[in-house]
Image (cartoon, rainbow, N blue to C red):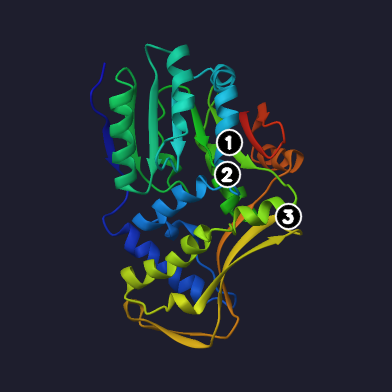
Amino acid sequence: MTNDYSYTDHLPADFSDKSLRADVLTGLTAPRKWLPPKWFYDKLGSELFEDITRLPEYYPTRTERSILTRHAADIISAAGTSTLIELGSGSSEKTTLLLNALLAQHPDDSAYVALDVSEDALRSACAGLVAGYPQLKVSALRADFTHQLDVLPGNEARTVAFLGSTIGNLDPAERATFLHTLRAQLRTGDHFLLGADLVKPAEVLIPAYDDAAGVTAEFNLNVLQVLNNRLSADFDRSSFRHRAVWDDQQEWIEMRLRSTRSMVVEIPTLELRLAIDLDEEIRTEISAKFRRDTLADELEAAGFVACGWWTDEQEWFSVSLWGI
């Protein structure tokens, strides 16, 4: 029995500030401006995203949850490991469905490792899990899964979970790098559990990222306030409009912010004066949607072997298990 969790910080104290500065400098000075979606999630952004997950138009969270509710026991049985590691764990809310099955099948040696860049999210989630699952060994790793997969604990056979279709936020080259790097860290007996959103009609996809109530628009615009707060920028949020665009060639949704006027934005922390033209857009997220065969091709190219595939009745979302 345990009444606490271990916490290990693999990031320097200034990691977030340095990463933000580098991303903004690289992305906003590019010929086509962009920002990575990880900067959405300040306190307000995280709250807005939780609101998004409850919107009628936003199917991914509830659909993935329905798959895990129905199939968690099968997933844990197929993986056969008593240690679950979650990349980008966030609130670890959906993970409880897997943990219930894990504890039922491995009551004496179940362990959960949460990995995230946010100390607040890690501590909040792990404290809740310790309270709710006193028999579970809980660990928190503050690390960045895009370049620190070597910190994954490796004493026992593990199932590494990457849920929520976060993989869709990576472009094809980034996905290939991530999958090959993860595969290199795994060994015989380990598994990879992946949640991935599937291709579906644009009339379903676009409203999921541009809801009638405007919550996603507020979420998208809030990233400008993050830059104002953290970099002393002077973005005028009222001069941008949220857009969600389906790219049927790349098969991904792009979230963008379009300017409604020409402007010059000052970012003093970066000593940057940023000219933005009328109708110029900043891409703030890609969210790739997958087909089963092409997703399998990407994982097999990285050295993974298919071990299980679960989806909902409409085949809108997938949870798949991969061995090595």
Residue displayed at 56% across by 28% down: 68
Which secondary structure, mark 1?
helix
Residue 201 on image: x %, y %: 75, 50
Residue at the image position 30 percent from the left and 39 percent from the top: 124
Amino acid type indicated by mark 1: Glu
Nearest to N terminus: mark 1 or mark 2: 1
Q: Is residue 10 visible?
A: no
Q: Depth check: 281 or 139 in front?
A: 281
Tell me if I can see residue 71 in this picture. Answer: yes
Measuring 59% from the left and 18% from the top, which residue is drawn there?
Answer: 74
Packing grade of label 2 (10 A; few <14, some 14-19, many >=20) is many
Tell me which amino acid carries mark 2. Answer: Ser
* Distance between the alpha carbons at the discs numbered 2 and 3: 17 Å
Marker disc for residue 186:
none
Return the residue at label 3.
202
Relative to 17, is 321 on the left or the right?
Answer: right
Q: For the N terminus, give its image quadrant.
A: top left
Which residue in the rendered view is the most extreme toward the front? 213
Q: Are marks 1 and 2 in contact (CB under 8 Å)?
A: yes
Q: Nearer the viewer, residue 297 or 308?
A: 308
Q: Which residue is mark 1?
A: 64
